[in-house]
């Protein structure tokens, strides 16, 4: 991913330009500088790949800053933001001589900026331009299969296992239940993010999160009224997710079971889409339809992972028939433990019993695998009938 910096004379412009960059999802980090000579980086200091230069604070001082950056790193790409929609030819020539590569007019068009960053990324080496996707989407094959429970406990176990920053975004429709399952009193929701895109940078986004201290999760709460979805644009959700990815190590999204063609751009940001179902006829039939739809949208089948929730050993025949029809291997089986899950939901806490509990252990193993570490080896002979073969295609019956 690209590194970036914004150069502006005042805090408002700095925040606005930072938000524009972070919402593209194409940068790894964003530095902030003022154009004054006191702020000039010194030889040996890091100069990012791209610099967004605001000319509103003074053309001469800003272009002097551009010249200085080009001396330190001749390959730096400088994009000037001009308060004039049509800069005069003299200014354009002066800017080009100072090392400015492209011009954007205020207010910055996010699509134009994203196009410019993609062109720069394409000029990097093959090993440098892959985007760092952190988003894991959790979807339910239909309502009532426990997708929110899976999202909450997966996020909690990711935070515990990795000891890194994990954010959980609740975008389930028509209303979200993540805060309810964690007994959180969230002051802000995703609507505060989508409704303030001109301010939405990593600093603003962090202020919208609610921390769940026991698990280490940070939550962007969902809707509490179905009408909150009425004027939410898909492009706004994409920009929110891009900023979220710049803030954390792992990003989990509860998407519920309702989506449409406008969700396609959001799903394409994911490194993994986990489809949660039970092993009954309605859920497996609907799950099969979801897989076909996602494939028709150009989402690679290997990005989709099927999770069978509330699993019983008697479900194996139905699961094998599903795998044969769809050529899609079930990724994980989460054993049924109605009492423990109900107790956790009523208490507003993630599952937290000891490591020898089958359901908790399976969530731990799932989180470990998603984090990239090796899952612990389990001796099935010693565990008897307990279902620890989480990633086995044919668990013992």
Image (cartoon, helix red, strand yellow):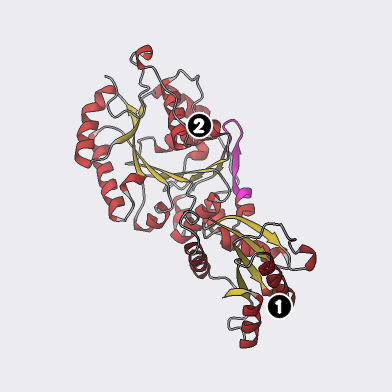
Residue extending furthest right?
38
Badge 1 density bin: few <14, some 14–19, many ≥20, Cα 10 Å: some
Q: Give the x, y percent position of residue 94.
A: 66, 82
Determine the residue positioned at 59% across, 72% down: 107
Q: Is residue 384 left or right of residue 109?
A: left
SS state under label 1: helix
Question: Along the line of sight, which residue is nearer the eye, 134 or 110?
Answer: 134
Question: Along the line of sight, which residue is nearer the eye, 75 or 62?
Answer: 75
Residue receiving disc 2: 157
Q: Is residue 295 above or below residue 390?
A: below
SS state under label 2: helix
Highlighted magenta segment, given as a residue range:
206-217
Q: Quadrant of residue 209?
A: top right
Determine the residue positioned at 43% across, 32% down: 366
Badge 2 density bin: few <14, some 14–19, many ≥20, Cα 10 Å: many
Residue receiving disc 1: 59
Question: Along the line of sight, which residue is nearer the eye, 46 or 150?
Answer: 46
Q: Give the x, y percent position of residue 250.
A: 52, 42
Q: Which mark is residue 301?
A: none
Q: Are marks 2 and 1 in contact (CB under 8 Å)?
A: no
Q: Is residue 114 left or right of residue 75?
A: left
Decide whether residue 211 is among the magenta residues: yes
Q: Is residue 65 visible?
A: yes
Q: CA distance from mark 2 to mark 1?
A: 51 Å
Q: Is residue 57 visible?
A: no
Q: Give the x, y percent position of residue 100.
A: 62, 74
Q: Mark 2 or 1, which is nearer the eye?
A: 1
Closer to the chain start, of discs 2 and 1, is 1
Decide whether residue 349 is among the magenta residues: no
């Amino acid at each position: 991913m690209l590194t970036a910096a914004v150069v502006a004379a005042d805090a408002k412009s700095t925040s606005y330009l930072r938000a524009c960059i972070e919402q593209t999802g194409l940068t790894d980090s964003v530095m902030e500088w003022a154009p004054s000579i006191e702020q000039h980086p010194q030889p040996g200091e890091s100069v990012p790949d791209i610099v967004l230069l605001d000319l509103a604070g003074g053309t001469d001082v800003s272009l002097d800053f551009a010249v200085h950056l080009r001396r330190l790193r001749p390959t730096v790409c400088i994009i000037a933001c001009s308060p004039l929609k049509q800069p005069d030819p003299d200014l354009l020539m002066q800017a080009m001589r100072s090392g400015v590569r492209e011009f954007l007019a205020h207010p910055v068009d996010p699509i134009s900026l994203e196009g410019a960053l993609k062109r720069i990324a394409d000029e990097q080496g093959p090993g440098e331009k892959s985007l760092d996707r952190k988003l894991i989407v959790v979807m339910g094959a239909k309502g009532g299969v426990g997708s929110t429970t899976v999202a909450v406990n997966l996020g909690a176990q990711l935070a515990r296992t990795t000891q890194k920053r994990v954010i959980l975004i609740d975008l389930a429709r028509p209303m979200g239940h993540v805060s309810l399952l964690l007994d959180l009193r969230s002051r802000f929701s995703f609507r505060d993010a989508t409704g303030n895109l001109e301010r939405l940078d990593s600093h603003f986004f962090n202020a919208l999160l609610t921390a769940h201290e026991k698990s280490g999760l940070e939550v962007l709460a969902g809707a509490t009224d179905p009408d909150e979805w009425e004027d939410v644009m898909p492009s706004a959700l994409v920009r929110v997710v891009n900023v979220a990815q710049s803030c954390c190590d792992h990003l989990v999204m509860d998407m519920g079971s309702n989506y449409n063609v406008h969700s396609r751009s959001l799903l394409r940001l994911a490194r993994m889409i986990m489809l949660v179902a039970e092993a009954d006829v309605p859920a497996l039939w609907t799950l099969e339809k979801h897989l076909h739809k996602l494939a028709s949208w150009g989402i690679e089948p290997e990005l989709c992972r099927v999770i069978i929730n509330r699993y019983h050993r008697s479900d194996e025949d139905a699961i094998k028939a599903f795998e044969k029809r769809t050529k899609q291997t079930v990724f994980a089986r989460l054993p049924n433990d109605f009492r423990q899950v109900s107790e956790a939901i009523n208490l507003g806490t993630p599952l937290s019993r000891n490591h020898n509990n089958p359901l908790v252990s399976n969530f731990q193993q799932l989180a470990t695998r998603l984090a990239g570490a090796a899952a612990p080896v389990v001796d099935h002979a010693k565990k008897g009938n307990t279902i620890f073969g989480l990633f086995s295609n044919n668990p013992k019956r």
